[in-house]
Image: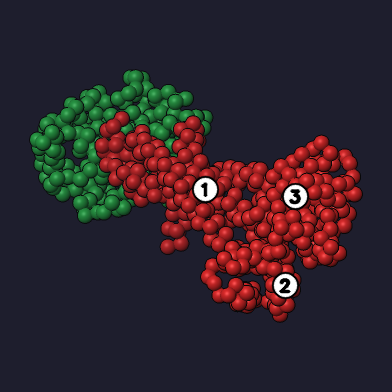
Chain colours: A green, B red
Amino acid sequence: MAEGIFFEMKGIDKDYIMGGEPVHVLKKIDLSIEEGEYLSVLGPSGSGKSTLMNIIGCLDTPTAGQYILRGREVEELDEVELAQLRSLEIGFIFQNSQLLNRLTARKNVELPLIYAGVLPKERRRRAEAMLERVGLADRMDHLPTQLSGGQQQRVAIARALVGNPSLLLADEPTGALDQKTGAQIMELFSELNREHHTVIMITHDMNIAAHARRIIRIIDGEIMEGGSTKDA
Amino acid sequence: MLKSIRSTVVMLGECVRMSLDNILSNKVRSFLTLLGIMIGVTAVIALISTVSGVSGSISTSFSSMGAGRLSVSITGSDLKTGMTPEDLAEISSLDSVDGLVPSVSLNGRVSYERTVETNVTVSGRNAYYFQSNPDLILQGRALNFIDDDNSTYCCVISQEMVDTFFFGVNPLGKTIYISGIPFTVVGRFEEDSGGGVASIFSGTPNILIPYTTAMKINNTREITSFTVYLKEGTDSEAAASEIEERMDTLFDYEDDCFTVTSMSSIEETMETMMSMMSSLLAGIASIALIVGGIGIMNMMLTTVNERTVEIGLKKALGAISWQIQAQFLIESFLLSMIGGLLGVVAGLGLSYALCKVLETSFVLNTGAIVLGVGFSAAVGILFGWAPARKASKLNPINALRAS
C-alpha cells in the first residue's frame, strides 16, 4: 500500500545550548517514512524523541542534515511556507490535548481551518463532520472542561484531522488517559491508518507503541534499532 | 488574488471575534484597563466642548453687541482729563458715526424705605442708548432727550433691583435714594439685553440715569468712557483711525491719553485666548490618555504571558506571525476604542452638564469627538504594538512546553 516516500531525513543533528553547555540532542538521524505508514517512536524521556517530533512537524529546524517532506527541502522554506505546510500536511495531537478552554469543542476543531483561510460556513460543516467521525456528535457545543479526558483527546484528534492532513503526528496521545480510554484512542488511530493516513506516534510505553506496524527506538538521540510488528 | 483578500478579511473578522471573546472573558480586568482610556477621553472631550461652548456664547454676545461699535476709554492728559459734551458732538458729527453713548459711572448706596443696598453700579447714559437698544425696557419708559437736556432725576432700574427693593410692588413712580439724592423710578430694564460685551468687562449696571445728571452728581464736565455706534457698513478699523485722529487734535497730540477698541479686535483676542486655553487643557488631559495607554500595554503583556500556550498551539496549527500579531493588536485596539467611545459619551454628558451649570449653550464639538476617538485608536495601536510583537515572536516549541 506504500505510494512513495512521505519524508526522508538524512544525517539530522540537533544541538541546544543549555546553561552555556551545548547539548547534542539528536545525532545523525536517518529516517524515511512511506505514505500510509503507522510508525511508533519509542524512547524514554530525555531521549530526544520530542525534538524529533518537532522537527518532523516543522516546528523546529535541525542544526545539520537534510529533511525532505513530500519532496520539499524544509530548510529552504520561509516562515509563511512552514506555517502553510503545518496547516495543510500535518495534524498535531499533543499529550494533554491542548484545547482552548474558552472555546467549545466545535470551535476548537475549527481553529486550524481559520488559519487555512476556510470560510465560516464550510468550517462549521467540516468541524461537525469530524466530531461525528470521532464519536462526539452530541458534545459539539460543550466546553473542554465539560468533557472527560478521553473525549478531550478525541476533540484534539478531530482538530488534527479536520484540515485533512496527510500526516498525523501524536505525542504521547494516551499519556493522560486511563488504560481503557487509551485503548479506544489507539483503536481510532488504527482505523485512521487503515483509511490511508500516515500516523507517527511518539511514546515511552512499549504497549502503546506495539499498536503501530513499525517501531523505532530512540535512545540518547540515536536510533538504536528499527523494529517491525507488521501484522496486517 | 480575490480569494486571498477574502480569506484575509475572514481572518481579520475572526481576530475581532476572538479579541472580543477574550475581552469579555476577563470583564473586570478589561473594564479596569479601559477605564484609564475612558477617563482620559472623558477629560479631553469635556474640557474641549465646555470651553468651545463658553467661547461660542461669548462670540454670540459679541455679535449681539454688534460689529459696528467702538469703545473709547480716556485716561487723559494733565491739561484735559476727559471729553466735554462739545467734544463728543464733534465726534458724533463724523461721517462714519451714527451716534455715541457716554457712560458715566457712580458707585452708590441706594435705599428705598428701609432697604439699603451698597455697591450698586449706577451708570449715566443718554437717550441714544435707549433708542439703539429698543428691547431693553420691559416696563415703563426709557430715558429720553428731555431727561438728558434737563438733567432730570429719573432712573430706570434692573430686574435685580426690582426684586431687591420692590418685591411684589409696582416700582413705577416710586422714589429711591441714590447717594442720598431722590430719583423717581420711570422704568424697568432687562439686564441681559443690550449690555453685551461691555457688561462682561464692567459688570452690568443696576440703575441707569441720564448722563447729564450723573455728571452733575460727580461734579464734572468731562466724560472718560463712551461707546461709538458706527453707521451700517462702515469699516470699523478705518472709523477707529478717523476717531483717533480727531481725538488726537482734541488732546493736543499727547501720547497715551485714550484707547479706541473695536469689538472685533476684542473678539479676536478672546478667540485666541480661548483656543489657547482649550489646547492647553486638552494637552493636560491627554496625559491621562498616555497613562491609560500604559495600562493597556501592561494588560496586553500579562495577557500574552498567560496565553503563551494558546499562541504556541495556534502557530503549530498553522497561524503565521502576522496573524498572531494582528489578533493581539486588534485586541488592544478594541479595548482602547471601547474605552474611547465610552469616554466620548461620558465626556459629552459631562460637558452638557457643565454647560447647563455655566448657563452657556452646549455645542456638539465634532472635532473633540474625532480627537478623542482618534487618540484612543492611536493609543491602542501604539501601546499594543510591543506586546503583539512579543506574542508573534514566540517560539511555538517553547510556548507549548510552558504547559
Image coords of residue A157 (percent x, y):
38, 34
Name the residue carrying label 1. B44
Query: In front: mark 3 or mark 1?
Result: 3
Q: Residues within 10 Å of mark 3 (few under 14, many from 20)?
A: many
Write down the chain letter for disc 2: B
Q: Nearer the viewer, residue B366 or B193?
A: B193
Amino acid at pointer 3: Asn
Instruction: Classify mark 1: helix, strand or loop.
Output: helix
Amino acid at pointer 2: Glu
Choose top left, top right, bottom left or bottom right for residue B302: top left
Name the residue carrying label 2. B86
Q: Quadrant of the C terminus of chain B?
A: top left
Q: Residues within 10 Å of mark 2 (few under 14, many from 20)?
A: few
Q: Nearer the viewer, residue B140 or A129?
A: B140
Mark nearer the N terminus (1 vs 2):
1
The residue lying at 44 percent from left, 29 percent from top is: A144
Image coords of residue A68 (percent x, y):
21, 50
Q: Which mark is residue B206?
A: 3
Instruction: Classify mark 3: helix, strand or loop.
Output: loop
Write down the chain letter for disc 1: B
Question: Would residue B120 be found to the left or right of residue B318 on screen?
Answer: right
Discs 3 and 1 lie in a common subunit? yes
Amino acid at pointer 1: Val
Mark nearer the N terminus (3 vs 1):
1
Between marks 1 and 2, how big is the CA–CA gap?
A: 55 Å
Between marks 3 and 1, how big is the CA–CA gap?
A: 39 Å
Res. B6 in view: yes
Image coords of residue B323 (percent x, y):
38, 49
Query: In front: mark 1 or mark 2?
Result: 2
Q: Vertical placement of B387 versus B187: above or below?
A: above
Mark nearer the N terminus (2 vs 3):
2
